[in-house]
Image: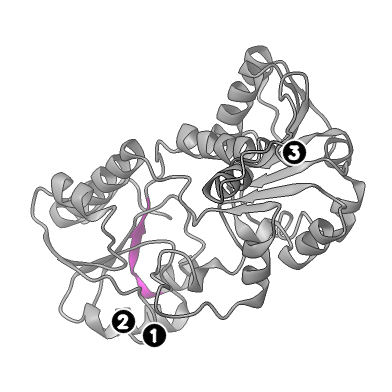
Amino acid sequence: MKTLIYSISGFDKPFIEKALHGNIDLAYTELSLNESTVKMAKGFDAISIFTSDDASVSVLQKLHALDVKYIALRSKSSDYIDMYKAHALGIKVANVPDIPSAYAVAEHAIALLLALNRKLILGQKMMQLGDYRLDHLVGFNLHGKTVGIIGTGKTGSAFAKIMHGFGCKILAFDPVKEEELKLQSNIFYTTFNDLCANSDVISIHCSLNSKTNHLFNQTTFAVMRKEVILINTAHGSIVNTADLLKALDYGVIAAAGLDVYEHEKEIFFKDHTRTPINDDLFLKLYAHPNVIITGHQSFLTAEVLHGIASTTIANLNEWAYNSVCKNEIR
């Protein structure tokens, strides 16, 4: 099966090549799939794409015209592909449903929280300038603080267990209550508003849908404590960035640690050393002294990359040998 891997990067190519086996002939491009690059798929049976790619209706129509029959997603999420259109065109799509990323993402959320709370970035900048004073570097003990968790799936549960180890009181908001997690982490489920009003730290671990889009907005921020630190490693669009900036500027909330950004597609996973970023909202957010942004790297561990690569190659091989794949999105 001839397969073109779009959006290949230095971090994932070695894992894909190591996992490669079976009846697959791979080609790579660093370019993302979009209206301009879709023509590169000519002559290929399958393509593999990542979250930075565009598999919208018009792109899928072009892929179908090029006789591309299979699309292997290198992610669990599928919000960057129009699944309805893919099904209508008869293009089979498979994802990586069991990415072992829960602890990778949860641990990254902890790293963002600790870096903000203990002023690690500011401290390093001051030391580089020769200023070793501690006047602006006071943080707070996490032990005994209240941590609010939005979404207690695999990642939210992993985050809860880690915070329980820190000695935190844990509030959670999720329509599905994990009874076993209650026993493991002494978690207390409550309403969204109660969580926002009573948490010292809020970490987002829910999926994006019509109910969670801009779940955090001006109204939500107004309910929060002024000392709260907001962490988002889930999806950028869950937070209204313009409202977040205002809340930070006016001291409505204290700080934000973000691994995702609602308009990240044109920014993250790309080299901007020679091309300026033309997104004023992002630039203001990036420059804010109480914000840390990482470029959607919370999943980026060797264990997760191995899992993504192995499952992607397995999906392609199942199509190559059987025309059916257990991880097809139906």
Q: Dividing the picture into quarters, in which one does residue 149 lie?
A: top right
Q: Secondary structure at mark 3?
A: loop
Q: Are marks 3 and 1 in contact (CB under 8 Å)?
A: no
Tag 1's secondary structure?
A: loop
Q: What mark, if any, has residue 35 been given in the picture? A: 1
Residue at the image point whose x is 29% and y is 61% from the top? 9
Residue sitting farthest toward the front: 130
Q: Percent from the top left, x then y, of residue 206?
A: 64, 45
Front in this rendered view, residue 275 or 225: 275
CA–CA distance in space, label 3 to label 2: 55 Å
Q: Quadrant of the C terminus?
A: bottom left
Q: Which residue is mark 2?
A: 38
**Circle 3 or circle 1, nearest the eye:** 3
Q: Residue furthest top?
A: 183
**Residue 135 bears which disc, if any?**
3
- As displayed, is residue 313 above or below residue 137? below
Observer-side mark, 3 or 2, equals 3
User: Magenta stretch: residue 9 in it?
Assistant: no
Q: Which residues are magenta?
A: 89-95
Asked if marks 2 and 1 touch (Cβ < 8 Å), the reply is yes
- Residue drawn at x 78%, y 24% is 145
Residue 1 visible in this rendered orientation of the protein = no
Kind of residue at disc 2? Val
**Is residue 320 visible to us here?**
yes
Q: Mark 3 to mark 1: distance in Å?
A: 53 Å
Q: Secondary structure at mark 2?
A: helix
